[in-house]
Image: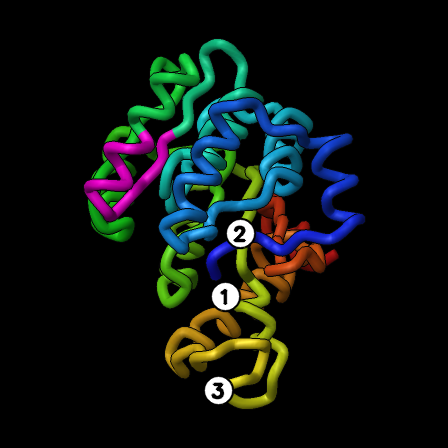
């Protein structure tokens, strides 16, 4: 995908409710020019910001930084002593994110952890055992593993948000997608399709989360960690 979808409705929403400042527009354009329009859209960034404000989150973990676009949206929602820990596997992207975060004046609120997310999350848990919110927007095949981490480290009542949970319009299919399905030139790998189906089924089963998926362009799942086992039976 080289550019986020546009329509009169989306443009209206973005311009009215989620106008980008010059820095956010620069980050988006930089990655679109690289053929990597894989950060959230402006309207989703504003939604992330609003959800964290409503939740009163202080400590947030983001899995998948890219250029820091969503990181900046979210960090602007945090209280003065709040902090966002974001994880990026690609060293070049991590360095770009640090640059943009510094330009945003948010270096005191955002730490960029560099490395493979599953490895970084293990290290992170040693010093940050409990978090208020987790946002997942990284390699789709590992979404079930990221859900494992969220189940273990989100506080009761904690917020989980995951992007791309419609998996490019293929996750609802009864079998792994073939070329052309979901509007894809190349099919989603069967292992990735199965992983996302597993993630969605676990999040929706009600045992550990109260969850819903918003039918955004790519699917945005929002869930609250159950307070206790009794809640899961309700």
Q: Which callout, 1 or 3, points at the residue further toward the start of the chain?
A: 3
Kindly report the distance in space between the C-alpha atoms of the residues bearing marks 1 and 3.
23 Å
Q: Can residue 157 be seen from the camera position used here? A: no
Q: Can residue 34 be seen from the camera position used here? A: yes
Q: Which callout, 3 or 2, points at the residue further toward the start of the chain?
A: 2
Structural crowding at the residue carrying mark 3, measured as other residues with C-alpha within 10 Å and reported as few (<14), some (14–19) or many (≥20): few
Q: Nearer the viewer, residue 8 or 102?
A: 8
* Magenta-tinted stretch: 85-97
Q: Can you tell which of label 1 and label 2 is closer to the viewer? A: 2
Percent x, y of residue 219 = 62, 59
Cβ atoms under marks 1 and 2 closer than 8 Å: yes
Percent x, y of residue 117 = 28, 49
Q: Which callout, 1 or 2, points at the residue further toward the start of the chain?
A: 2
Kindly report the distance in space between the C-alpha atoms of the residues bearing marks 1 and 2.
10 Å
For disc 2, the marked residue is 162
Q: Nearer the viewer, residue 20 or 62?
A: 20
């Amino acid at each position: 995908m080289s550019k986020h979808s546009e329509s009169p409705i989306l443009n209206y929403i973005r311009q009215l409710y989620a106008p980008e400042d010059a820095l956010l527009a620069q980050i988006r354009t930089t990655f679109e020019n690289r053929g990597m329009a894989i950060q959230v859209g402006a309207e989703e960034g504003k939604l992330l910001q609003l959800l964290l404000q409503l939740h009163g989150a202080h400590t947030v973990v983001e899995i998948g930084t890219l250029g820091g676009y969503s990181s900046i949206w979210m960090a602007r929602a945090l209280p003065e002593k709040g902090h966002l820990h974001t994880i990026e596997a690609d060293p070049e992207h991590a360095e770009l994110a640090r640059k943009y975060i510094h330009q945003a004046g948010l270096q005191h609120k955002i730490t960029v952890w560099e490395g493979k997310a599953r490895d970084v999350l293990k290290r992170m848990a040693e010093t940050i055992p409990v978090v208020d919110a987790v946002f997942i927007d990284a390699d789709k095949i590992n979404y079930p593993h990221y859900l494992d981490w969220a189940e273990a480290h989100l506080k009761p009542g904690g917020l989980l948000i995951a992007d791309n949970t419609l998996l490019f319009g293929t996750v609802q299919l009864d079998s792994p997608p073939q070329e052309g399905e979901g509007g894809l030139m190349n099919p989603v790998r069967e292992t990735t399709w199965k992983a996302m189906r597993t993630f969605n089924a676990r999040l929706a089963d009600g045992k550990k989360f109260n969850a819903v998926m918003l039918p955004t362009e790519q699917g945005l799942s929002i869930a609250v960690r159950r307070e206790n086992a009794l809640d899961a039976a309700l």
